[in-house]
Amino acid sequence: KVMLIITGIGKVNAALSVAVMLSKFEFKHIINVGLAGATKGYTIGDKVVIKDASYGDFDVTVGSFGYEFGQVPNMPNPFLSDYDLQKRAVFSLGAYEDSLYTQDKFVTKKDLKHNGVYDMEGAAIYQVAHVYQTKIISVKLISDIIDSDTQLEDFNHFEKTSAIILKEMLLSVL
């Protein structure tokens, strides 16, 4: 049995949607599928299986708290994908593996702390999965290259044409 949840855009929408579902039903695992931007080195249409996720805009590194950039207090950093699910997804999709950084903004400048994949929901879904002790994997389809001259046009075009690819990706992972 599979349940499809469309969370909406942003960390709060994603976390709320997944938390509500996990509070009502028991799941063996979560498969998060969606679009993401990426730093140079990727091309539009690349498939990336996420090995770990953290926040790209969460910062409580000041003082002597002892937290890393991207780490929510009392949470791991990064959140890890389930290893077995990750390897099966890489094999079934012939995909790359990389880290995911989640921010509540559409990243358009190369002023980032890390190279990799960026979205607006992933780490929040991983955090909820961690709290509910549910295995998780995330597969991202690269929709735009951060800081390219045509980034916004590329995203707008790809967002409109990617539904079939995302569906095929999900079915391959399942």
Image: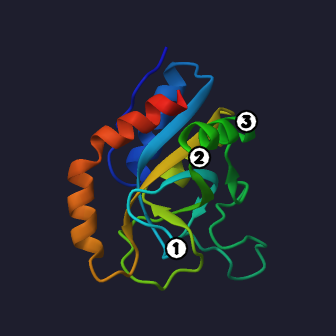
Which badge, 3 or 1, comes first in the chain's sequence?
Answer: 1
Distance from the alpha carbon under mark 3 to that under mark 1 = 26 Å
Q: Which mark is residue 84?
A: 3
Q: Quadrant of residue 84?
A: top right
153 sits to left or right of 19? left
Q: Amino acid at mark 2?
A: Tyr
Quote the CA–CA distance across marks 1 and 2. 25 Å
Instruction: Tell me which residue sits at (45%, 29%) in the image.
Output: 171
- Which residue is drawn at the image coordinates 74% and 70% (left, top)? 67
Q: Which residue is more in the foreground, 146 or 45?
A: 45
Mark 1 element type: loop
Q: Is residue 168 left or right of residue 52?
A: left
> Which residue was labeled with disc 1?
41
Observer-side mark, 3 or 2, equals 3
Rendered residue at 38%/46% (across/down): 13
Q: What whole-number distance in Å separates the C-alpha atoms at marks 3 and 2?
A: 16 Å
Q: Picture coordinates of residue 54 (x, y %)? A: 61, 60
Q: Residue lying furthest front in this view? A: 94
Q: Residues within 10 Å of mark 3 (few under 14, many from 20)?
A: few
The mark lying in front, picked from 3 and 1, is 1
